[in-house]
Image (tube, rainbow, N blue to C red):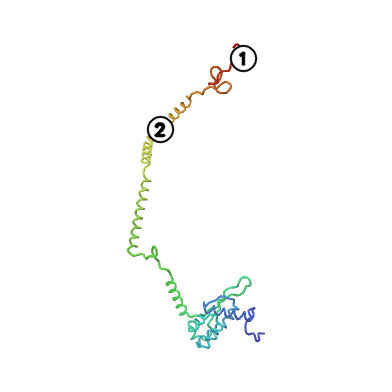
């Protein structure tokens, strides 16, 4: 029996649960749409709608009550100045929960918690976003960040057209040359061969001359003077008496006896 059960505990302590809900409500007022589990979304919706009711009163006491829950002062100002005026004609039901999917892992049910808006509000918001995107979109510029003048742009277009025409003429000329008959090609090749013949003759003459010079050098090297023959003992050459030049011959023993 569900007696005296005020809220979901969300498997958290009191302080942890209170911090979680404060963060969820602050994110909802800042982004106007958040994604979380269905259980957390239902608990955050109770607190968010109570704070919107405080903001609709728009007095000092209600501002202090909201500031005690919402973490950011800028979000408090946005709640009182932008969000609360949208629901002056609505009595409750400021938020909506949309079920989206099952979370992988624990199969927790995921949903979207968002602020309810009318069609007029949605259209105005779309226009505002489109204008902001156009304002932030960079403008197209020319070379080095300068805008192209209309005359310069026109001149560039004419130059591009002229260049295309020249390329087309060149391609047609090449195509016409390729389409000539085979006879003209043969004549051209024969003329080229005749022009190359004298160059070949001169080259052969110069090569023959070089061969002749090399043959003469080889004959000259063969006709060298013979070396002087050395003595039979392998020593220095000797004179008429068998002695070396500049040395007196030695007398034999018989000649000494006769003396």
**What crowding class fits label 2: few (fewer than 14 Cα within 10 Å), some (14-19), or many (20 or more)?**
few
For marks 2 and 1, give the CA distance.
75 Å
Q: Position of residue 165 (x, y in %)?
A: 34, 54
**Quadrant location of the N terminus?**
bottom right
Placement of 157 over or under 176, stated as above or below = below
Which residue is at the far right? Answer: 1
228, 153: nearer the viewer: 228
61 with respect to 180 (left or right): right
Which residue is at the far front? Answer: 259
Front position among marks 2 and 1 = 1
**Quadrant location of the C terminus?**
top right
Q: Position of residue 5 (x, y in %)?
A: 64, 85
Q: Secondary structure at mark 2?
A: helix
Tag shown at residue 57 = none
- Tag 1 or tag 2, which sits nearer the N-term? 2
20 with respect to 155 (left or right): right
197 with respect to 75 (left or right): left
218, 53: nearer the viewer: 218
Placement of 150 over or under 257, stated as above or below = below
Circles 2 and 1: CB atoms closer than 8 Å: no
Residue at image position (53%, 19%) is 239
Tag shown at residue 253 = 1
Q: Position of residue 211 (x, y in %)?
A: 44, 30
Quadrant in the rendering for residue 35: bottom right
**What crowding class fits label 1: few (fewer than 14 Cα within 10 Å), some (14-19), or many (20 or more)?**
few
Q: Position of residue 139 (x, y in %)?
A: 40, 68
Q: Secondary structure at mark 1?
A: helix
Say which residue label 2 marks. 206
Residue at image position (52%, 78%) is 30
């Amino acid at each position: 029996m569900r007696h005296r059960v005020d809220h979901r505990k969300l498997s958290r302590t009191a302080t942890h649960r209170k911090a979680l809900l404060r963060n969820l409500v602050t994110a909802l007022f800042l982004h106007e749409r958040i994604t979380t589990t269905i259980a957390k979304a239902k608990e955050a919706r109770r607190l968010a709608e109570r704070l919107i009711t405080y903001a609709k009163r728009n007095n000092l006491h209600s501002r202090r009550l909201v500031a005690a829950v919402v973490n950011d002062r800028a979000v408090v100002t946005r709640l009182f100045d932008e969000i609360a005026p949208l629901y002056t004609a609505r009595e409750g039901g400021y938020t909506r929960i949309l079920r989206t999917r099952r979370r992988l892992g624990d199969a927790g049910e995921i949903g979207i918690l968002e602020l309810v808006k009318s069609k007029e509000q949605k259209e105005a918001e779309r226009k505002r976003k489109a204008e902001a995107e156009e304002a932030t979109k960079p403008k197209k510029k020319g070379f080095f960040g300068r805008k192209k003048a209309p005359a310069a742009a026109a001149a560039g277009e004419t130059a591009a057209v002229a260049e295309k025409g020249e390329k087309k003429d060149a391609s047609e000329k090449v195509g016409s040359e390729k389409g000539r008959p085979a006879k003209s090609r043969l004549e051209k090749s024969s003329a080229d061969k005749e022009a190359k013949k004298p160059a070949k003759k001169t080259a052969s003459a110069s090569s023959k001359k070089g061969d002749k010079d090399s043959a003469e050098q080889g004959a000259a090297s063969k006709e060298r003077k013979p070396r002087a023959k050395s003595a039979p003992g392998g020593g220095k050459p000797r004179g008429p008496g068998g002695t070396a030049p500049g040395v007196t011959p030695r007398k034999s023993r018989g000649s000494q006896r006769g003396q």
